Amino acid sequence: MVYHEIYEIKGCYKLIRSLIKGVGSYAPPKVLTNADLCDMVNTSDEWITSRTGIKERRIARDNVTTADIATYASKAALEMAKIDPLEIDLIILGTVTPDMLFPATACMVQHRLGLKNAAAFDISAGCSGFIYSLSIADSFIRSEKFKNVLVVGVDILSRITDYTDRATCILFGDGGGAAVLSANYNGGRGILSTHIHAEGGHDDILKLPAGGSCMPASLGTMTNRAHFIKMKGSELFKYAVTYLKDVAMEAILYNNLKPEDIDLFIPHQANMRIVEATAKKLGFPMEKVFVNLQKYGNTSNGSIPLALDEAYRSGRVKEGDIVLVDAIGAGLTWSSALIKW
Ligand SMILES: CC(C)(COP(=O)(O)OP(=O)(O)OC[C@H]1O[C@@H](n2cnc3c(N)ncnc32)[C@H](O)[C@@H]1OP(=O)(O)O)[C@@H](O)C(=O)NCCC(=O)NCCS
């Protein structure tokens, strides 16, 4: 137990943690393989596999939206948590591909799931959005503002991916997940800490230029393909390896732990080379690292909750395990959370 986790209330000390009571995820059934991409751009399965580790990704049908995926994933998480929907106090949804700029996609999910007592808002923090959302949810719970919070991370990156740009279209896919966090007044299990960072000076490395107030949609933005992801891949790669290692170490040290105390590391599922380099720097053997990017590619906000759900449902995470998650994304933003499952 760390001293800063204990709150003094009317002379009594109590430890509140946000327990992850339920997880759920959803990935659309349609698969886009490396072979499919070879028919679209000048690339090869060998190049994609050796540079990224990705073999295939999922693509949402035209009529499926971020709110749909968020709703499916949230339903599964709520079922696992066995919680009355009316007891959810708040929904936070991380995404860079909301259904619309406003209203928030979280409000659509709130309505569809009948979470009538929940406040709802979206978070835009690039691929860190899910962990940023976990951090906000954890703060609300530990400050006793709310008891039950639904945290969701979903993206349909195929809607903003340029399938004529071989440097980016091989990386991205669609999907997402959700987690139900509930106040645990007995201490022990739950989120041990979260750590969130940003460096806006690197805003040019990964961005979607058009569609905001800076470059509103016009015929010109359409012609210039400005509604698609623009990325400086090799620059981002270097920051990813450094920041993912730093923010993971920050979580470990903050909790007075050592890398060997971590049972499972779930890094942002962006690129196998980034995952392996980060794990090596942290001294984690690959058996302790969860990877599913070969099946989904980078799903941005969907990456961590999709992996968390799959890790739990496949038995890789058991009660009492110490699980470390971290992510990096546009902003730049980077973040981590340490969880006692
Ligand atoms: C995108 C990424 C896989 C590219 O790998 P890389 O080793 O950095 O490759 P480079 O961009 O330096 O390009 C090397 C060469 O491969 C070529 N290339 C790029 N994409 C290619 C593809 N899909 N198939 C074949 N060749 C490709 C480039 O044109 C370049 O050719 P050149 O040397 O003749 O100019 C890698 O930079 C990456 O993963 N970066 C991080 C991306 C990321 O994680 N983004 C999301 C974070 S939230």
Image: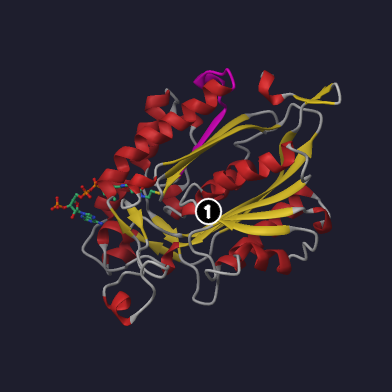
Residue that appears at 57% across and 48% down: 305
Q: Which is more toward the observer, 157 or 286? A: 157
Q: Which region shows up in magenta?
A: 255-268
Position of residue 244 relative to residue 115, above or below, is above
Question: In which quadrant of the rendered view does residue 9 lie?
Answer: top right
Instruction: Identify which residue is drawn at 43% across, 69% down.
Output: 159
Vertically, is 265 above or below 4?
below
261 within the magenta span? yes
Q: Nearer the viewer, residue 7 or 245?
A: 7
In the rendered view, does 169 fall on the left or right side of 296? left
Q: Residue furthest left?
A: 42
The picture places residue 339, in percent across and down from the top left corner, at 63, 33
Foreground: 10 or 337?
Answer: 10
> Which amino acid type corresponds to the residue marked 1 in the rendered image?
Gly
Q: Is residue 126 left or right of residue 229?
A: right
- Side of 70 where 331 appears, left or right: left
Viewer can see residue 79: yes
Q: Which quarter of the picture shows residue 145?
A: top right
